[in-house]
Amino acid sequence: MTTQTQPRAKAAPTASPSKLGRPHYGTHVFLLAVAVMWLIPLGWTLYTALRPFADTAKYGYFSFGGGYSLDNFATAWTQAGMGKYFVNSAIITIPTVLLTLFFASMMAFTVSRFSWRFNITLLIMFTAGNLLPPQVLAAPLYSMFKFTPLPLSVSDSGNLLNTYYSVIMTNTAFQIGFCTFVLSNYMKALPKELTEAALVDGASVWRQYAGIIMPLCRPALAALGTLEVIFIYNEFFWPLLFIQSGDRLPVTTGIKNLQGDFLSNYNLIAAGATITIIPTLVIYLLLQRQFVAGLTLGATKS
Amino acid sequence: MTTTTARPARPSGARAARGNHMLTASDKVTLSVMAGVPTLIQAVLVWLPMVLSILLSFTKWNALRLSDIKPAGLSNYQFIVNDYPPFWPGVAHNIIWLLFLALVATPIGLLLAVLLDQQIRGSRIYQSVFFVPVMLSLPLVGIIWQLMYARNEGFINNVLGTAGTPAAIDWFGNSSVNLWAALIAATWRHAGYIMVMYLAGLKGIDPSLREAAAVDGASASQTFFRVVFPAMKPINIVVVVITVIEALRAFDIVYVINRGTNGLELVGALVVQNLVGEGQVIGIGSALAVMLLVVSLVPITIYLSRAFGSED
């Protein structure tokens, strides 16, 4: 008995005796059903967005009557001022991700390649900071920004509130912890001989960092960079808290106004929602592996 | 893949110690700056606010002038516990949220990962499908499900045939069902996230473990529950921590639906309600935040002791 099951288990993917074939058949039915359930919300959103309001009003939303067009997308884009939102998202996301990776990689380099007092303690505190619910930091950060005076030429509020800086700074600080943790694990795994040889040759620590370690971290930086772009693009909380002017909101926070903008015109809401998915979808199609690698990078540790 | 190369080697103190001896004075300055600047950023924008949050929770303040801050003792906490109507519903909803994620959403993610791990046809396509919602922001998830749940225009009521009749349920508006409706929306995203984690975990399982179990005549479910699942302990802990922290942070979806009111109260949303807009009550918002902080220290400590336990 046991001798029979062993080769079978090994050959599972290709072998098709009834005992192995049936579970896979059931698995496919189940997965297909779940996959359809998973796709319905997206399909429904896209379908609603493609139909003119007049047609859905006439035939109902749950129908095939009427025509299809991209008009809702154009209307949603202009009426909700989505172009502005996308520019704001770029203004916030690009510097945040670059600054986060820059600071986190320096910190990770110092804690993982050198041994000094408190290096592990600091790394633990960095990691802990990222795990906090952001609500915990909300009131003090709001107050700190409010009472940080800025010249009116820099900020029309006279302080850090209602500026991109506030969101960029907070996002960067909040993400540095996670990126430092991931990068320090990665750097620790690089062989010590790499930098030792450089040290003997008299290379400065900055050269070790910029010339040896960072190039070797490219896979981790690519994965983290992709992950962070999505994280920051999807970030809702900090702009909600710090930015009062609607025309400075990034996409993710701006879309909370879609329902207000379009009242019960679900076709336009659906079009607006679909538009905001597009950048994510592009990254998803191009860099899905990087994104998944980034997600699991922080979780897997021997 | 990348995950395997990211595994750290055993830290070797000897290497680092030797390295430190060879550092020049300017190297030491460089290192201090490289560690100092990020640490300063963390200190000012994360650690200091955390401490200030605790201090502010014992004050009364409307955020207008710094000189208006008045000590208030425990009165904010007393007010919240005794006289703030949405607080206890919020706590109850957070607990329901956690239980639903832990008992429904996370197991779905695990089940999907186990099914997809067995090299079936189209596994990659299925993975991609389940993964799409993970890439979407939570507010967007809320809006997409608003389209599904709308009273007369939504998909669900149309499938049920109740759309346009008085029997149609406003799934996000009706306070007796909207928490569950929001949880289904949250599950749509959470399950894919957990699936990715477990797919990585399952890939890391030594195949000889399964073979040994098969040789011993263990059934598929025995092999999974007695051998594979326990062997994934590191990932299990991460998943538990993620699930608990997600449940504590939860706020985006309900905030987009109705700002976290009328059946959708969550502590995380109550914090924001007290801080955003007119009539800010910083003391109350901070006290609620401190409660979140205290509870979140449990999963954070578990995570940190696992991540750093072997090194410290």
Image: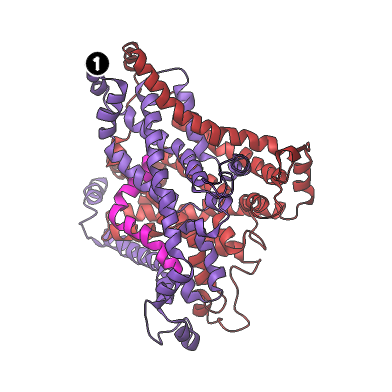
Chain colours: A purple, B red
The residue that disc 1 covers is A202
In the image, residue B103 lies at what x, y percent? 53, 53
In the image, residue B167 lies at what x, y percent? 62, 80
Q: In which quadrant of the rendered view does residue B96 lie?
A: bottom right
Vertical position of residue B245 compared to residue A129: above or below: below
In the image, residue B100 lies at what x, y percent? 55, 55
In the image, residue A16 lies at what x, y percent? 22, 60
| Residue A260 vs residue B186, the one in the foreground | A260
Q: Residue at 40% across / 84% down in the picture?
A: A64
Q: Residues within 10 Å of mark 1 (few under 14, many from 20)?
A: few
Q: Residue at 58% across / 59% down in the picture?
A: B254
Q: In which quadrant of the rendered view does residue A28 lie?
A: bottom left
Secondary structure found at label 1:
loop
Which contiguous range is marked in magenta? Answer: A272-299
SS majority, magenta: helix
Q: Residue at 66% across / 66% down in the picture?
A: B175
User: What quarter of the picture does the C terminus of chain A occupy?
Assistant: top left
Q: Is residue A289 left or right of residue A127?
A: left
